[in-house]
Every structure is written in structure tokens, then in C-alpha cells.
Amino acid sequence: MKILIYGINYAPELTGIGKYSAEMAEWLAARGHEVSAVTAPPYYPQWEVHASYRAGRYRKELRRGVTVRRAPLWVPGKPGGLKRLIHLASFALSSLPSLLRAAAGRPDVILVVEPALFCAPAAWLAARLCGARAWLHIQDYEVDAAFELGLLKGAGLRAAVRRAESWLMRRFDRVSTISNRMLDLALAKGVEPGRAVLLPNWIDVDAIAPRDGGDYRAELGIPENAVVALYSGNMGGKQGLQTLADVARRLSREHRLWFVFCGQGPERAPLEARCQGLPRVRFLDLQPAERLGELLNTADIHLLPQRAGAADLVMPSKLTGMLASGRPVVCGAAPGTELASVVEHCGLVTPPEDGAAMAEAVRKLGYNARMRETLGAAARQYAQAHLHVDAVLGAAEREFEAVLASKDKPAAREA
């Protein structure tokens, strides 16, 4: 089977959406499929093109059996509403020649990963031109989230964008996404049930497993008997990171509790400013992928803040690693959201953007080792049962084969 993956983020050394695309591609290539990718030079989450790449250059490389074509894009130093749109549009335009060149190889499936939705029209068109099946995978309802978080405004604009998005989504042979609530939203946008697929995020539960994380503690000067609350991931607008500073400040007199905030993004500098003067807060840059397991095991408690209104529009990919590490999670999510329903069995759920409630949850877990152990074991069990990479991608592989085998409307399937 020949599969072409198209999307702005593709970076195996990172976490998040870029790692998602790369891991899928490399897993399928290892299974004997012919896999290629059209993407941008890696720039996320620092919003700066990595040192070994050039933002304005086309480049072709081979990575673990995957042919990767990288197209230029413009990366704003401080991404905002209009700048972000121009940034996405720059890649959608510059990548079109690379996409058509890759499509000339007549792939069986062209899979486009959202964000960014800007890439979807070209992916659909390329699939129709070369006779491939068109597949849209939604990691993040970026348009809905942008309006909910106030990055885009205007009722008229929102209605127009929704109509265009719905029209486009209905044209794909398959539309997949990562949670049941996000799948329901796809159906509400007009996707036929027979074309909708649940394809959750995954994790290698053998690579990320509960073990000692003492090396990071020593490097950061954290006592062995301290209780560490860790946030590791993108530091952008959707995460509600101001809550972390509020939690750390409220618990500044709890000498047993330490905080580690790891990641990069536009909200890191404001977070560091809010934490200035707090002696038991440590910041780390994005760490190498090979140290991810060690980093996650540094935590006694994982922190997962979330902006109000975004919980059912995204399912944070960082959650998979948190669960696999066998540590409890303190999560900011509204009751009844799918994120809350997952975390409530293996951690504590607090209202989003409520620093006082999250601080109390951290305090509660920090002084109750038995509760941490019980909830951590439940987290590990959930990851093993539902998130193992081989199980999730094995189901995706079968779904690729099914969409090729079906010449009429595909039957309803769930990966």
C-alpha cells in the first residue's frame, strides 16, 4: 500500500502533532508499506525553524524508510491571529508543488493532518487527480478553538467558516479524529457516520513505563524526597498556563512540593515572569525524545491545565505519556467533557483555569502517597488497555485497507 501523509508538522524528535505524523509514517513503513510525507521544516513549538533547516528552502530527505519532502513557510516570531493565518497559508501555497510531485507517484491514500485545515483542499484535490482515497485526520479543531479562545471573532465570519469547513469535510472518503466527543462534532458538521473513524492518540507503553526518574532531580537540584508536579508540553495559548503560575504561588510555602515546567512556546516567557521569585520552580527547555520517559518519570504528579471552552475541541496528545508513566494527573477540565471522563479514573479533575482548585488537588495528592500510587496504577492500566501504539496503528492499517477495498460508500468502522 502506498500512503502519502500531508501536514505542516512532522518532527519525530518532538512530542505532539509532529511526532504523531512521524510515528504513524515510520510505523507503516516498518510494516512494509511505501510511505511518503509532505511537510514543513520543523519549527514547533519554539516558532523558530530548527538550526539544521532553512525556512525558505525545499528539501528532500529519507527518514527511517519514509521519503520526506519539506516545503518553505513563513514563521512569525510572535504568532497572533492574522500572523498565524498568513503562516499557515504560506505553507499551503509553497507545499502545493511538492504535494503534486508526490501525488504523481499514485499513492493509494492521501492523509492530511489537521491542523492545519488550510492544507485540506489541496490534499482532497491531489487525491482526486491521482485516484487516491482522501483521508482527513483531525488532531485539533483549530477553527472552533480559535473562536472559543477569542483568537478569531465575529458571528458572521464564524458562520461562513463553519459552512466552508463542513462542505470540505463531507468531500473526504474518511474523516478520523482522536476522541468520541470530537467524532460527534465531525458528525454534527455533516460527515456521514460511515465515513467517520475514531483514531485515538497512542503511546509506546514499553518505551514509556514507570521507573525511577532520579537523574533529572539531581540535575535540577531537587531533593530525592520531594514531591514533583510536572508540566511537559507545548507552551501556547490553548494550554491555560497562567494557572500553573497561580498553583505554584499558592503552594510556595509547601516546602515538600516542587514544580518543573518543561517546554517552549510563546507563553513560556510570561509564565517565567509570573513564577519569578518562587524558589521551588524549575524550567526546562524541550528535551530530546530519547529522554521523554525519564522526564515523565521525574513527576510524582502530572499537571494538565486547559483553557475553558477548549476541552472537547482538543484531546491533548501529552496525556498519553502521562498515563503511560503511571503517575496521577491533575487536570483542568469541565465536568462531562471527554478529557474529564478519562482523567477522573486516574487523577483529579478541577474546573479549568481555577488555580485555587488545582492547587488544592496538588496539595491533596502531594501528602497522600497511597492515593498517588492507586491513581498512578489506574493511569498505567488505562494506557496499556487503550493506547498501545501497535493496537491503535494496527486498527488504522486495517482501516486504510478497508477504504481501498470499498468502491461504494464505506461501511461504518471504528479504529
Image (spheres, helix red, strand yellow):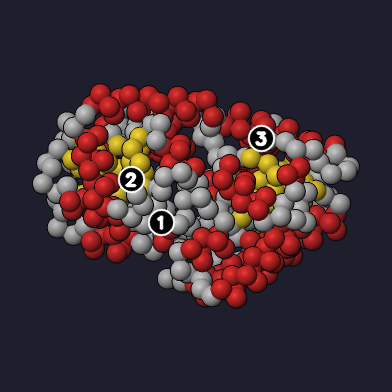
Q: Quadrant of the N terminus?
A: top right
Tell how many labels. 3
Q: Which amino acid type is shown beneath numbered disc 1?
A: Ala
Q: Earlier in the sequence, mark 2 or mark 1?
A: 1
Q: Does the rendering let one see residue 270? A: yes
- Classed neighbour count for the residue bearing mark 2: other residues with Cα under 10 Å, few (<14), some (14–19), many (≥20): many
Q: Which residue is mark 2?
A: 350
Tell me if residue 403 comes above or below residue 149 in the rendering.
above
- Classed neighbour count for the residue bearing mark 3: other residues with Cα under 10 Å, few (<14), some (14–19), many (≥20): some
Q: Which amino acid type is shown beneath numbered disc 2?
A: Thr
Q: Residue at 14% x, 49% y: name it.
A: 252
Q: Is residue 223 left or right of residue 394?
A: left
Q: Residue at 57% x, 63% y: name it.
A: 143
Q: Which residue is mark 1?
A: 308
Q: Looking at this rendering, what residue extends furthest in the front direction?
A: 336
Q: Earlier in the sequence, mark 3 or mark 2?
A: 2
SS of the residue at dot 2? strand
Nearer the observer, 264 or 339: 339
Marks 3 and 2, how far apart at CA: 30 Å
Viewer-nearest of discs 3 and 1: 1
Q: Which residue is mark 3?
A: 415
Q: Residue at 14% x, 38% y: name it.
A: 256
Q: Which amino acid type is shown beneath numbered disc 3?
A: Ala
Asked if the residue under mark 2 is in contact with the one under mark 3, i.e. CB atoms within 8 Å, the reply is: no
Q: Is residue 36 left or right of residue 228?
A: right
- Classed neighbour count for the residue bearing mark 1: other residues with Cα under 10 Å, few (<14), some (14–19), many (≥20): some
Q: Earlier in the sequence, mark 3 or mark 1?
A: 1
Give the x, y percent position of residue 71. Answer: 64, 63
Give the x, y percent position of residue 305. Answer: 36, 50
Tell me if residue 93 comes above or below residue 255 in the rendering.
below
SS of the residue at dot 3? loop
